[in-house]
Image (cartoon, rainbow, N blue to C red):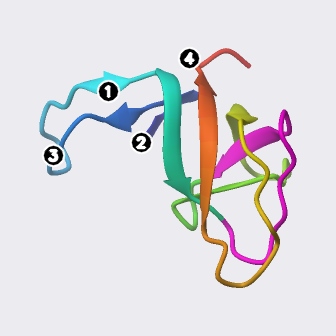
Amino acid sequence: MLVGSIFGVAEGAAAIGETAVIRLVGVFSLPKAPSQAWTVGQTIYWDAANSRTTNVLTGNTRIGIATQAVAGGAGDTTGIVRLNGGAT
């Protein structure tokens, strides 16, 4: 969930407009752009238009760093990200 420049992971399901508990820091498995390789320590961004993480800066919001390398295959659609708590 992205609110302004603050990104967090909801602790549970919540409908739009409902209150939700959001975790701003921690390490999470998140959906990522397919066919995109990541390296450990690489800056990761939130692609709000596609509701997934990416290593592409342009048009996206910085959310943290990759904590595991990910291959760049079409089926590699999950990445492990340490959130930065909303700091840019």
Residue in view at x 84 percent, y 33 percent:
41
**Magenta segment: does it hold 36?**
yes
Residue identifier under label 2:
1
Name above or below for residue 61 compared with residue 54.
Answer: above
Give the class, few, some or many, for how many residues have Cα within 10 Å of label 1's Cα (few <14, many ≥20).
Answer: few
Q: Are marks 1 and 2 in contact (CB under 8 Å)?
A: yes
Which residue position is annotated with label 4? 85
> Above or below — where is 83 with respect to 70?
above
Which dot marks residue 10? none
What type is the residue that disc 4 sits on?
Gly
Label 2 or label 4, whichever comes before in sequence order: 2
Residue bearing the label numbered 1: 22
* Amino acid type for the residue under numbered disc 2: Met
For label 2, the SS is: loop
The amino acid sitting under disc 3 is Ala
Q: Is mark 3 on a helix, strand or loop?
A: loop
Of pointers 1 and 2, the one earlier in the residue sequence: 2
Please name whichever residue, 8 or 70, is drawn nearer the observer in this view of the structure.
70
Q: Earlier in the sequence, mark 3 or mark 2?
A: 2
Rounded to the nearest angstrom, the CA distance separating label 3 from label 2 is 11 Å
For badge 1, the amino acid type reads Ile
Indicate whether 28 appears above or below 82: below
In reply to whether residue 42 is colored magenta, the answer given is yes
Q: Alpha carbon of mark 2 to alpha carbon of mark 4: how far?
A: 12 Å
Real-space CA distance between mark 4 and mark 3, rounded to the nearest whole angstrom: 21 Å
Out of 35 and 49, give the one closest to the viewer: 35
Q: What secondary structure is the magenta-colored segment mainly? A: loop
Residue 53 versus residue 40: which sits nearer the camera? Answer: 40
Q: Which mark is residue 14?
A: 3
Q: What stretch is highlighted in magenta?
A: 33-46
Task: Judge the density around disc 2: few (<14), some (14-19), many (≥20) Cα neighbours within 10 Å.
Answer: some
